[in-house]
């Protein structure tokens, strides 16, 4: 696995949360 993936893991969680919000809106 790429080290960058771990570093951006926290950021990815935030993006997923935002994506879920948009997805739930529909």
Image (cartoon, rainbow, N blue to C red):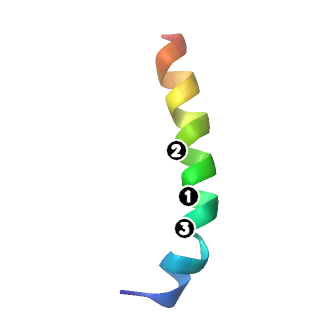
Seen at 35% across and 86% down, the residue is 1
Residue 19 vertical position relative to residue 6 in the rendered view, above or below: above
Residue 19 vertical position relative to residue 5 in the rendered view, above or below: above
Of label 2 and label 3, which has the lower sequence position? 3
For the view shown, which residue lies furthest in the left direction?
1
For residue 24, which numbered disc appears in the image?
Answer: none
- Out of 7 and 22, give the one closest to the viewer: 7
For residue 9, which numbered disc appears in the image?
Answer: 3
Residue marked by disc 1: 12
Whether tag 3 and tag 1 are in contact, CB under 8 A, the answer is yes
Residue 4 vertical position relative to residue 10 in the rendered view, above or below: below
Q: Residues within 10 Å of mark 2 (few under 14, many from 20)?
A: few
Whether tag 1 and tag 2 are in contact, CB under 8 A, the answer is yes
Q: CA distance from mark 1 to mark 2?
A: 6 Å
Residue 7 vertical position relative to residue 25 in the rendered view, above or below: below
Taking the image as shown, residue 2 lies to the left or right of residue 9, namely left
| Image quadrant assignment for residue 4 | bottom right
Count of numbered badges drawn on the protein: 3
Residue marked by disc 2: 16
Q: CA distance from mark 2 to mark 3?
A: 10 Å
């Amino acid at each position: 696995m790429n080290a960058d993936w771990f570093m951006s893991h926290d950021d990815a969680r935030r993006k997923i949360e935002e994506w879920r919000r948009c997805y739930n809106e529909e």
